[in-house]
Image (tube, rainbow, N blue to C red):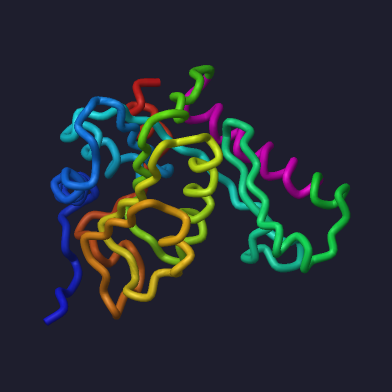
Amino acid sequence: MERRPPLWADRTEAGIELAARLRDHLPHDGQTLVLGLPRGGVVVAAEVARLLDADLDALVVCKVGVPWHPELALGAVGGNGVRVRNEDVVRHTGLTEAQLEQAFSAAEGQAARREQILRGGRAPTAVAGRPAVIVDDGLATGATALAAAQVVRALSATEVVLAVPVAPADTDPRLGAAVDAFVALARPRRFGAVGTWYEDFRQVEDDDVRALLGT
């Protein structure tokens, strides 16, 4: 019988359980970088990083939407300036290079503002040449997670793992193609909203994220 929500008391408890599941997916050489998606994902990621003795950082990613259809992604940008383009969507829209530049620049500005708020002047932890685990507190549409995976791949991680406590049973199959491993503790058919799977799903503030990152 499928388990019913809530499954976890809070994000911290979910992170502890997720870390236990991830032990079999990651090398134990001290090189793994755990990247939490702000804001709630950073709380889960902090427990994963602590229990796996891995480095922790936040990953700021902004999806670049088609101007007249924001949910359709032209690509994504990271707070570190990385751009990823979905060439199939770009061709389909017929947008000019000037229009594309405007869309990507606007998203980069948004990402840069979020980076400044969360980490001040501290530079992001380097991703290249090491395995990276992207962590969120749950997936709904999966669009942000897909964009995050594309950005981390572009940063030359040796392995990209996406790990969440809960995701819909019919999670977008493109996620599986974008990562080397996808780990979800629960994959319910009746998903609802991410928050229903936690007893305590209070809003995570920027100050909370800064405290976890030590910034």
Q: Residue at x 36, y 68 (%)?
A: 193
Main secondary structure along the magenta-highlighted residues: helix
Percent coordinates x, y for residue 116 in the rendering: 55, 27
Tell me the quadrant of the picture where the N terminus can be found. bottom left
In the image, residue 105 sits, relative to residue 6, either above or below, namely above
User: Which quadrant of the rendered structure holds the C terminus?
Assistant: top left
> Is residue 192 rendered to the left or right of residue 151?
left
Q: Which residues are magenta?
A: 102-120
- How many numbered marks does the figure carry? 0
- In this view of the protein, can residue 41 be seen by the observer? yes
* Most distant residue in the top direction: 121
Q: Position of residue 165 (x, y in %)?
A: 25, 57
Q: Is residue 87 left or right of residue 98?
A: left
When the figure is inspected, residue 30 is found, relative to residue 46, above or below; the finding is: above
Residue at point 31%, 51% (across, down): 163
Residue 48, horizontal then vertical, whole percent: 23, 39
- Is 87 positioned to the left or the right of 175 in the image? right
Q: Is residue 135 magenta?
A: no
| Residue 115, magenta (yes or no) | yes
Q: Nearer the viewer, residue 170 or 154?
A: 154
Q: Which residue: 62% across, 43% down?
A: 77
163 lies above or below 196: above
Residue 40 in sight: no
For the point 44% across and 36% down, the residue is 157
* Pick the front one: 47 or 200: 47
Residue 201, x across and y down, in percent: 28, 55
